[in-house]
Image (spheres, rainbow, N blue to C red):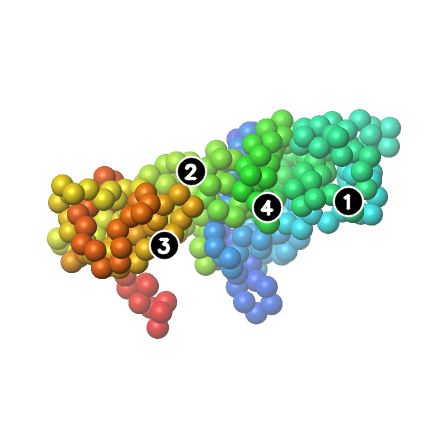
Amino acid sequence: MTGASPADGVVLACEHLNVRRGPREVLHDVSIEVRAGELVALLGPNGAGKSTLMEALAGSLPAAAGTVQRSGRVALALQAPDLARRTVRTNVELALGWWGVPRAQRRQRAEAALSAMKADHLGRRAAATLSGGERRRVHLARAVSVRPDVLLLDEPFAGLDAATRAALLDDTGEALRAWTTAALVVVHDRAEAWALADRLLILLEGRLVADGPPRELLERPPTVEVARFLGFDGTLERAGGGLLLTRAYHVVIDRSGPLRAVVERVIPLEDGVRLELALDHGKLYASSPLPGPVVGEAVAVRVTGGVEFAGDAAHEAQSAQVGNRA
């Protein structure tokens, strides 16, 4: 991997990065590049090391091994949208002052950033009076206002209801592309990554296990481990030891379907039910409109997609799962 330099478009990079928190090594041999013009999402379960990676890239945590290269100025916005007990506009101006922006430019920059985040109507409000969604908008306006070369955002949409999060996702994507050279954003779930990013990084147990366009990774996950994390929870065992992994939308309840299954569990959803189906050679999950089958009912199903893994890859994944449970 090349170093971060404007000549090749790389504005932030790490190579073979290991990071410790106390005696525990949290990141193991992580190498990534972020290029100018990219909006990259970082996804992983709790405890995977996402926040540690962001702090190391920003320079807040030292590397135990490996290197970090930065081109230009890197800004890190932490998850908590903590605001000073001042007006909204003053909060943004304070960030600009800390960043070294001349006083004469701060008001205009602050108002423009608030407008970019659809929060210009909040400028005169006291920060203490804001709702959770409003605080997030101001927090993001403060981050983009400084116009960093690389902006690192740690779960900027956490704790919001679905409607508020959806609106903020759309506005944030537009603001990041207009106000930053590149951005790396820790996201909480897959939907946020699909909606926001050009490229997706997946971190599991402190290791980078996948890197690619979000849709490509969802359709063709590189390993069983990544597929499981991306929601491929159904399993059909193939002849020769291979596996077909499926998501619920790949499995259709169909009287003429070639597979026979028994409903083992029914989970109510807002607009239907989720079914857990037991088969002779695996377990599948499907969605059904109400009222749906009941527990113990025999049903016919067909599988319309999924991802296949050969015997060796499947065996290694199953061995790893047994090892983790031991």
Q: Residues within 10 Å of mark 1 (few under 14, many from 20)?
A: few
Read off the residue under disc 1. 129
Q: Secondary structure at mark 2?
A: helix
Q: Nearer the viewer, mark 4 or mark 2?
A: 4
Q: Residues within 10 Å of mark 4 (few under 14, many from 20)?
A: some
Q: Secondary structure at mark 4?
A: loop
Read off the residue under disc 4. 160
- Which callout, 4 or 3, points at the residue further toward the start of the chain? 4
The image position of residue 211, as x and y in percent, is 42, 42
- Which callout, 2 or 3, points at the residue further toward the start of the chain? 2
* Amino acid type for the residue under numbered disc 1: Thr
Image quarter (top left, top right, bottom left or bottom right) of the C terminus: bottom left
Q: Nearer the viewer, residue 171 or 134?
A: 134
Note whether residue 12 is visible.
Answer: no
- Residue at image location 37% in from the left, 67% down from the top: 324
- Which callout, 4 or 2, points at the residue further toward the start of the chain? 4
Read off the residue under disc 2. 214
- Residue at image location 60% in from the left, 36% down from the top: 168
What is the CA distance from the residue labelled 4 to the residue labelled 3? Answer: 24 Å
The image position of residue 276, as x and y in percent, is 29, 55
* Amino acid type for the residue under numbered disc 3: Ile
Q: Residues within 10 Å of mark 3 (few under 14, many from 20)?
A: few
Q: Is residue 209 left or right of residue 68?
A: left
